[in-house]
Image (cartoon, rainbow, N blue to C red):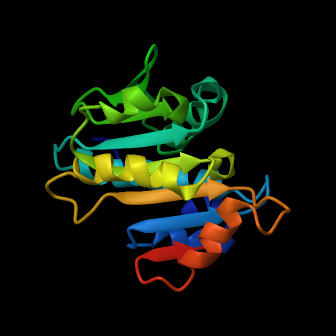
Amino acid sequence: MKQIDIDLNKEINPHFVDVWYSNKPYNILRGGRNSFKSSVIALKLVFMMLMYIMRGEKANIVVIRKFASTIRDSVYNKMQWAIGKFGMLDQFKMTVAPFKITHIGTGSTFYFYGLDQFEKLKSNDINDIIAVWYEEAAEFDSSEEFDQTNVTFMRQVHELAPFVQFFWSYNPPRNQYHSINEWSDKMKGEDDYLVH
């Protein structure tokens, strides 16, 4: 594997640096459109996968949006951007039917789902999962939607991972009583959560 040369100080908003170092199972990132919350998560997910790839291990990551139709122009492109920042695009194969980004050497894969494909999501047989990212989490109806899918992914954790690490990112709705705002406020102070 070639040497990776990336200046994380340049790529990660200092506001989210604690997310980069987080070892918590649950990580909630709130911020405006240009806060780079999605960028730090995408970079961290690539870095997490690389730690397994460098050991010759297969590791998988699941990225979820509320609607499958939004995948290509958001998280799929963002993950390609992050892989490119590590200078490794030539080591991955990209497909759009289905949306996947797969490391050629190990088979490690980024899987992309819309929650509107819940049956596909529920019946997935991915295994070796190290992380799950819910992008634009404010689009989801309630935290119960996360709970339904999280259980599936937690059972498919990689044998070398202590747990599946979950990430949620969203632009906080103005309504403080919106379900995502209430949920993330409730999680503040919980030992297993980083709420940013």
- The residue sitting at 42% across, 36% down in the picture is 88
Quarter of the image holding residue 100? top left
Labels in figure, total: 0
Left or right of 75? Residue 102 is left
- The residue sitting at 44% across, 67% down in the picture is 26
Nearer to us in this view, 8 or 44: 44
Nearer to us in this view, 147 or 64: 147
Left or right of 148? Residue 37 is right
Q: Position of residue 149 (x, y in %)?
A: 40, 46
Q: Is residue 84 above or below residue 165?
A: above
- The residue sitting at 47% across, 75% down in the picture is 193
Q: In the rendered image, is residue 50 in sight?
A: no
> Which quadrant does the N terminus fall into?
top left
Q: Is residue 80 above or below residue 170?
A: above
Q: Position of residue 22 (x, y in %)?
A: 44, 72
Outermost top residue: 97
Nearer to us in this view, 114 or 142: 142
Outermost right residue: 174
Q: Position of residue 66 (x, y in %)?
A: 59, 38
Q: Position of residue 81 (x, y in %)?
A: 58, 38
Left or right of 163? Residue 30 is right
- The residue sitting at 63% across, 48% down in the picture is 141
Q: In the rendered image, is residue 56 in sight?
A: yes
> Which quadrant does the C terminus fall into?
bottom right
